[in-house]
Image (spheres, helix red, strand yellow):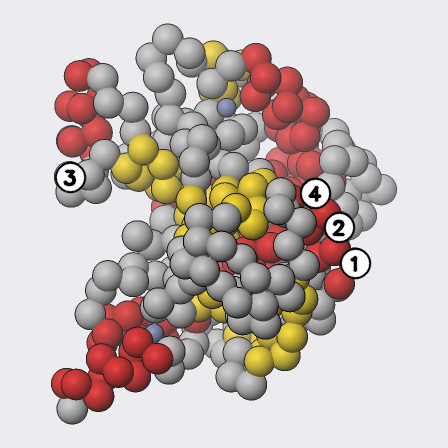
């Protein structure tokens, strides 16, 4: 299963490893590591940095269970937002749907959580121009940056919330669509009456930094669609071959973003509540000192497909033991 989004546009440049803010990681671990496993970040020759365990971990043990720093629903095939909760990304069951000013929620809890974080700001403005831009270009990241900006304006996030994540070097010159997205976002906020002072963080360089981090750190939130008969028909029409699951949206998670890729990972990425809460569990027993690895792509694919996908989306040719072994067999 594809866990991360492929790079969306021009960003295929070599991945630059950002300065790690250990303080951020430590506080993330304290709140999100149910088993209190001690982790450490170390430099890795080929990959810049990686996340290692200082304690042994048993098969099936949960390392992390947390909602994303920021998330937003995906744009469906028709360009409309997916029919998912705007807060937790859960697909709706038919009787639990709740609408607030064209934004939909699975219930009161999600609506009040959204109100505190992004909805208070979003309700004051007309987001349609940015949604239309995203639909036209088939991109999602500007909506994530918009939500982060709304959270900053509500004082529920800091403008440097994503600063500990790795980033890809922005292309030069900047893609014209990035400048357009930024201009649209800034414009809808100004039109809604937000002052230059309150928008001082929202500069073009800030926007570019967020986008260049999202490109390599966003996880696709793949959830199971509800299986009542009416939904069977619409799900089949919308996404033939997805087997009842689909990308409900995208989210940024701090701890798993620190993990490198392997086609034979020792950590599974799961969404056990069928919403945006991510769980990391051990696929097997892991010894103290081992690196924790997840897969960024469909690990069931053929070695050549895996390598070309990783090269295209993340700028590296996978040299994991499984790839090397499988590649040697076809030479
Ligand atoms: Zn919800
Ligand atoms: Zn590999």
Q: Residue at x 42, y 79 (%)?
A: 316
Q: Nearer the viewer, mark 1 or mark 3?
A: 1
Q: Is residue 328 left or right of residue 174?
A: left
The Cα–Cα distance between marks 2 and 3, rounded to whole angstroms, is 42 Å
Using the rendered image of the protein, determine whether residue 146 is visible from the camera's viewpoint: no
Q: Residue at x 24, y 61 (%)?
A: 300
Q: Is residue 184 above or below residue 89?
A: below
Quadrant containing the C terminus is bottom left
In the rendered image, residue 224, in percent from the top left (x then y), is placed at 31, 33
Q: Is residue 320 left or right of residue 286?
A: left
Q: Nearer the viewer, mark 4 or mark 1?
A: 4
Residues tagged 2 and 4 counted as in contact (Cβ below 8 A): yes
Local crowd at mark 2 within 10 Å, few (<14), some, or many (≥20)? few
In primary-sequence order, the first of circles 4 and 1 is 1
SS at badge 4: helix
Query: Ligand 2, what quadrant?
Result: bottom left
Q: Is residue 115 left or right of residue 278?
A: right
In primary-sequence order, the first of circles 2 and 3 is 2
Local crowd at mark 1 within 10 Å, few (<14), some, or many (≥20)? few
SS at badge 2: helix
Q: Residue at x 23, y 74 (%)?
A: 303
The residue pinned by badge 1 equals 23
The residue pinned by badge 2 equals 27
Using the rendered image of the protein, determine whether residue 300 is visible from the camera's viewpoint: yes
């Amino acid at each position: 299963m594809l866990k991360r989004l492929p790079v969306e546009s021009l960003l295929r440049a070599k991945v630059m490893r950002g300065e790690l803010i250990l303080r951020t990681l430590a506080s993330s671990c304290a709140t999100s590591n149910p088993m209190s496993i001690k982790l450490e970040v170390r430099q890795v020759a080929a990959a810049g940095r990686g996340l290692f365990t200082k304690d042994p971990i048993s098969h099936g043990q949960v390392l992390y269970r947390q909602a994303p720093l920021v998330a937003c629903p995906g744009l469906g095939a028709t360009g409309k937002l997916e029919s998912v909760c705007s807060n937790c990304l859960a697909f709706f069951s038919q009787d639990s749907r709740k609408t607030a000013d064209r934004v939909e929620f699975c219930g009161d809890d999600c609506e009040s959580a959204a109100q505190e974080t992004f909805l208070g700001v979003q309700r004051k403005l007309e987001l349609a121009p940015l949604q239309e831009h995203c639909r036209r270009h088939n991109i999602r990241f500007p909506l994530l940056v918009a939500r982060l900006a709304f959270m900053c304006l509500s004082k529920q996030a800091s403008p440097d919330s994503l600063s500990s994540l790795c980033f890809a070097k922005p292309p030069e010159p900047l893609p014209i669509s990035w400048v357009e997205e930024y201009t649209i976002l800034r414009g809808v906020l100004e039109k809604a009456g937000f002052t230059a002072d309150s928008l001082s963080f929202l500069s073009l360089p800030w926007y570019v930094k967020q986008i260049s981090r999202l490109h390599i750190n966003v996880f696709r939130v793949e959830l199971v669609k509800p299986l009542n008969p009416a939904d069977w028909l619409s799900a089949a029409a919308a996404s033939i071959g997805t087997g009842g699951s689909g990308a409900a949206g995208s989210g940024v998670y701090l701890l798993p973003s620190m993990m490198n890729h392997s086609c034979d990972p020792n950590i599974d990425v799961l969404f056990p509540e069928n919403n945006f809460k991510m769980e990391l569990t051990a696929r097997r027993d892991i010894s103290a000192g081992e690196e924790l690895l997840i897969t960024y792509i469909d690990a069931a694919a053929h070695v050549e497909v895996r390598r070309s996908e990783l090269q295209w989306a993340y700028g590296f040719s996978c040299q994991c033991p499984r790839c090397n072994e499988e590649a040697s067999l076809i030479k």
